[in-house]
Image: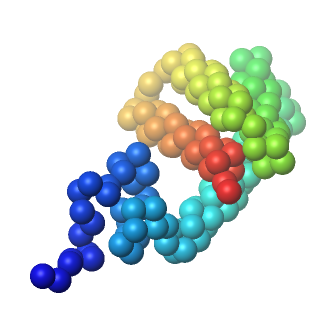
Amino acid sequence: MAENRCIPPLDTLRFSNFKNLLFFDGTPSAKGPLMKKHDTLIMYGLVVLSVLTSFLFISYGVNIIMSPIPARWLLTFAYVTTAYGMANIAVLSIAWSSRERWACEVNKLIALCYLGVFLVNTVKTGFNSGLEMVGILALALVLLANWFAVKKVVSRS
């Protein structure tokens, strides 16, 4: 009876490494080269996105700081926004050069702190429409992408 190579036998599956199931070639530990290239492309894409969003945070903060007469609370928010952008670039470069696991935790901490400051700032100015929730969700997605970029950089091979 011919053995079916499309479906691996159940006793050879290791669910702790799900990537092996995507490009199975008959051996339990096979890892296809396409998956490796795919991970690399995702990592570089996330790094570019993280750097661009960090520079947007820095630019936004500096524009508020340089405005003629900003409100005191808005000036504080601008400093925090600029600091988050610079801290994200710093953590990303540390993760790139050292691959230390603590870089993921530091990035998560500063992202959650910034999200908290943004939420407080949004509550302070008031919810006038549903667009504030869209802004919070968009910011949360950007912060999640920045954290995931650091995580991919740390775990690269």
Displayed quadrant of residue 1:
bottom left
> Toward the viewer: 20 or 85?
20
Taking the view exactly as shown, the residue that stands out farthest to the left is 1
Residue at 46%, 38% in the rendered image: 137
Q: How far across and down, in percent of the image, does residue 40 sit?
A: 62, 64
Q: How far across and down, in percent of the image, does residue 99 sit?
A: 75, 44
Instruction: Mark yes or no: residue 85 visible.
Output: no
Displayed quadrant of residue 5:
bottom left
Q: Is residue 92 above or below residue 115?
A: below
Quadrant of the image for the C terminus?
bottom right
> Toward the viewer: 106 or 72?
106
Query: Could you tell whether 109 is left or right of 95 in the image?
Result: left
> Toward the viewer: 90 or 37?
37
> Toward the viewer: 124 or 56?
56
Residue at 75%, 37% in the rendered image: 100
Query: Could you tell whether 114 is left or right of 54 in the image?
Result: left
Q: How far across and down, in percent of the image, does residue 133 sit?
A: 43, 33
